[in-house]
Image (tube, grey):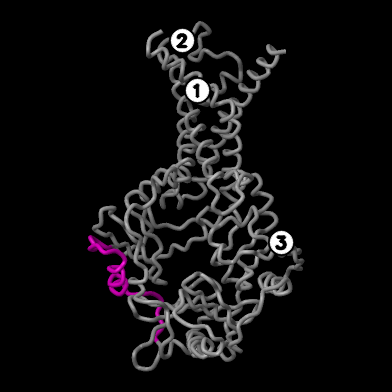
Amino acid sequence: MSVGARARRLTYLVHRWTGMGGCLLMVLWFVSGVVMLYVGYPKLTPWERLGALPALSATQCCLPLDAALASSGVHLPAQSMTLTSIRGQPHFLIRDHNGAYRAINARTAKLAGEVDAAAAQDAAVAFMPAGTASYDGLVNEDRWTHSGSLNAHRPLHVVRMQGEQPATLYISSTTGQVVMDAPLSQQRWNYVGAWLHWLYMFRFQSTDPVWSWLVIVLSAVATVSAITGLCVGLWRWRFSGRYKSGSRTPYRAPWMWAHHITGLLFAGFVFTWIFSGLMSMNPLGVFSARGEPPIMILYHGGAPGVSGQLGDAQGVVARLHEQGFAVVEMEWRRLKGRPYILARNGLGESRLVLDDGEGGLQIRERWAEADVLRAAAQLFPYQISGSQLLTQYDNYYYGRQPEAMNGSTERRLPALRVDFDDPGQTRAYIDLHTGDVAATLDGRERAGRWLFNFLHSWDTPGMLSAAVWRDIVLILLSLGGLLVSVSGVVIAWNRLRLWLKVLR
């Protein structure tokens, strides 16, 4: 047998054996992928969280921040300082440089007490006033709370909410805030959606290398099955001439015929979806940034602090109300050393509050491009090679619908894109509304964006803007991939039955 014939024979065998299990796995992935277009994994988006907060009072809001810190015994510097509402009452939320939170009652300056079952239920009712709360204990982690962003809040209080829209709420045992909501309908759909798609029945903790490698190996096997199947399908198709049956395919059995024809039509899409799913796991860190991380402390110009008029939290709230802005949350920040407050309302809109240098307050909707560019120069120890003001999304900075995996990430316009002359050709995107560095991507990470996000989700801004047509095309192609997979499962089952019959 020639080398070419042996290679072909090996390809046939690899496709047969990998396909017997791989097709069943791909059936699950295609079904769950269609569900995920409309129902995402449970998450608490910024808009949901802010929308549940009451507006801060313009007359009875809070003490000055420095007075509250002094009375409570909490010392600066801090990683973050926020005025928000917990269980319907204003609190200063201070996070130290170790990541630990301290909550201070903004009216009494007393440190918040232990978050017990009663406090957790109060927080749940404040978040969903129309529901009836029942406490369901403490969990460190369960099927809906794998996100590493919840680590600072564990263990989590679980409260079941009954009513028109029943849900499970998770409350931080550290701050008493609602940090995750999982509506019951979303949970049910997730069992045939994201939870099934990501094989979360095998994941038991937020960082789970066993689960990660299981998904990587299974995705790799399915990728091999898809590419070998495409080769076999092309080899068996008569592009010139026909078989004795008069057909261009040698298969007469209905399921074999269907598998061959649909495989030729959809194998390319099957391969790109399975391969991009493998790339989503970033195997061996192939898409991890190789350069230095951004130096955020230099970008900010120091830790947030209390100074002048900005420390008078009550006065800032009153001034925002005068401007017609019903603030629900404020965070003290710096941009290249200049202190400011980022204020948000219940719609997620924001305002910047700055000291005008004359004993008053200045309120802006966003930062000037020049201010942000000067701060951005501190992000990396390399020269800026170019910058651009974005008034439209590009292929690396764009918004997604809430159902998407990254649907809770804010991506607002205008934004500033800054390119650096470092070995990795790093690019930074900065939200001018907030001053947040929304993303930094080097060449490897930008390549990963195309090999995962684009191939898997078709998420260029142009495609996302054609929402209905994009969904229709994705569903039709998924149904084609499903038919390829189902026919493969039937073929595998028939072959297994034949082998079992022979063994008997």
Residue 432, placed above or below residue 220: below
Q: Which residue is mark 2?
A: 242
Q: Earlier in the sequence, mark 2 or mark 1?
A: 1
- Of 453 and 292, nearer the camera is 292
Disc ID at residue 382: none
Residue 477, placed above or below residue 93: above
Q: Residues within 10 Å of mark 1 (few under 14, many from 20)?
A: some
Residue 374: in magenta span: yes
Left or right of 30? Residue 12 is: left
Q: CA distance from mark 3 to mark 2?
A: 60 Å
Q: CA distance from mark 1 to mark 3?
A: 49 Å
Magenta span: 362-387
Residue 1 in sight here: yes
Q: Which kind of residue does numbered mark 3 sit on? A: Gln
SS label for mark 3: loop
Q: Which residue is mark 1?
A: 14
Residue 476 x %, y %: 54, 37
Q: Quadrant of the C terminus?
A: top right
Q: Are marks 3 and 2 in contact (CB under 8 Å)?
A: no
Residue 198 x %, y %: 57, 45
Q: Quadrant of the N terminus?
A: top left
Of discs 1 and 3, which sits in the foreground? 1
Residue 476, placed above or below residue 17: below
Q: Residues within 10 Å of mark 3 (few under 14, many from 20)?
A: few
Of discs 2 and 1, which sits in the foreground? 1
Q: Which residue is mark 3?
A: 165
Q: Earlier in the sequence, mark 3 or mark 2?
A: 3
Q: Residue 455 falls in which quadrant of the image? A: top left
Q: Which kind of residue does numbered mark 2 sit on? A: Arg
Residue 334 x %, y %: 38, 77
